[in-house]
Amino acid sequence: MRIIGKLLVTALAAIIAANLLPGVTLYGGFSAILLVAVLALLNTFIKPLLVILTIPITILTLGIFLLVINTLIIKWAAMILGPSHFVVSTWWAAFWFSIVLSIVTYLIEGLIGKADND
């Protein structure tokens, strides 16, 4: 049940991030859930391989290259879902979407965590 809650929180964060950023379009709640499912699959299976393959450049850039990997994952998710669900117009839009998505997810989970502890 906790996994479903995490997916729903991330879907809400994706809707918020898409509304905040120009160049990112997310078509509805169902598309947000699809996006989160695709991101979860890509982050589970593809991202670890990319991280391992790019260890030298990640070390040279002191970890900043991981932001490039996150951007790539967002662009791939947009390609998988297609323009009827999720559109990211540029690499910079994907870059900022990944950062805003992480921050908004963190904030929502923090608010929910405080509500659960009270």
Image: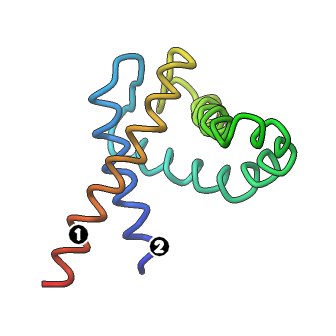
Instruction: Name the residue rendered at 68%, 59% in the picture.
Output: 44
Quadrant position of the N terminus in the picture: bottom left
Q: Nearer the viewer, residue 104 or 26?
A: 104
Label 2 or label 1, whichever comes before in sequence order: 2
Residue 19 screen position, x and y as percent: 28, 30
In the rendered image, the vertical position of residue 78 relative to residue 13, given as above or below: above
- Give, as a three-letter code, the residue at label 2: Ile
Residue sitting at the far left = 118
Callout 2 crowding tier (Cα within 10 Å): few <14, some 14–19, many ≥20: few
Real-space Cα separation, disc 2 to disc 1, in angstroms: 14 Å
Looking at the image, how many numbered discs can be counted on the residues?
2
Judge from the rendering whether residue 44 lies leftward or rightward of residue 104; answer left or right.
Answer: right
Q: Secondary structure at mark 1?
A: helix
Q: Can you give x and y, in whole percent of width and height, for residue 103 in the image?
A: 36, 47
Name the residue beneath numbered marker 1. 112
Residue 65 in picture, x, y percent from top left: 68, 35
Disc 2 secondary structure class: helix
Residue 2, x across and y down, in percent: 42, 78
Q: What colour scheme was applied to this rendering of the protein? A: rainbow
Point 59% across, 48% down: residue: 38
Residue type at mark 1: give it.
Ile
**Where does the C terminus fall, quadrant-wise?**
bottom left
Whether residue 24 is situated above or below residue 77 in the rendered picture: above
In which quadrant of the rendered view does residue 110 lie? bottom left
The answer to whether residue 47 is left or right of residue 10 is: right
* Residue tagged 2: 3
Is disc 1 surrounded by few (<14), some (14 to 19) or many (20+) residues within 10 Å? few
